[in-house]
Image: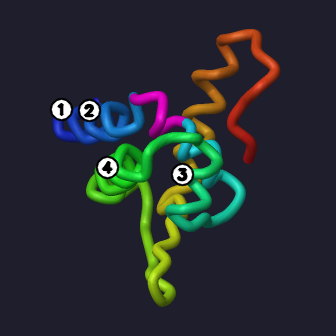
Amino acid sequence: MERQVAEQIAEILRAIAHPIRLSVIELLAGSEMSVSEIVEALGQRQAAVSHQLNLMKDKGILVSRRDGTKVYYRLDNPNIVKVLQCVQSHYPTNGGVSP
C-alpha cells in the first residue's frame, strides 16, 4: 500500500473512531436524519452531536442538506458501513450496524 493511500485510510479510521460517531453511522446506515432526530436517538447533548457531525462531514464521511431551519445528514459513502460490519463481526454481539 502506498504511503499516501495508507495516510488517507488512517485519517478516515480516526474520523470514525469515537463511540458517538460510530452510533451516528449506525443510525444513518438506513436513511438520512435531521440533527434533532440524531440527538434524540443518541440521548446526547446537541452541542456534542453537532461537533461529531461536523467532524465527520469535514472528513467526507457525511454530507448535509438544509431544509428550512433543519439540517439533515446522510452517509456520503455507504461503504463505511461495510468496514464497520467487518470490524464488528469479530465481536459476538446481538447489536450491529445494519446495511
| Among numbered discs 1 and 3, the one appearing first in the sequence | 1
Separation (CA) of disc 1 from disc 2: 5 Å
Name, please, the residue furthest toward the right.
94
Query: Secondary structure beneath disc 2?
Result: helix
Q: Is residue 91 above or below residue 18?
A: above
Q: Nearer the viewer, mark 1 or mark 3?
A: 3
Q: Please report the residue visible at 26 percent of the width from the left and 37 percent of the height from the top.
A: 11
Q: Amino acid at mark 4?
A: His
Q: Which residue is mark 3?
A: 39
Whole-percent x, y for residue 75 in the image: 52, 59
Q: Amino acid at mark 1?
A: Arg
Query: Secondary structure beneath disc 3?
Result: helix
Whole-percent x, y for residue 32 in the image: 61, 66
Dots 1, 3 in contact, CB < 8 A:
no
| Among numbered discs 3 and 4, the one appearing first in the sequence | 3
Q: Which residue is mark 4?
A: 51
Residue 4 is left or right of residue 16, and the answer is: left
Whole-percent x, y for residue 92 in the image: 75, 10
| Among numbered discs 2 and 3, the one appearing first in the sequence | 2
Dots 1, 2 in contact, CB < 8 A:
yes
Query: Secondary structure beneath disc 1?
Result: helix
User: Which portion, as a residue range, is magenta?
Assistant: 18-22
Within-10-Å neighbours for mark 1: few <14, some 14–19, many 20+: few
Picture disc at residue 6: 2
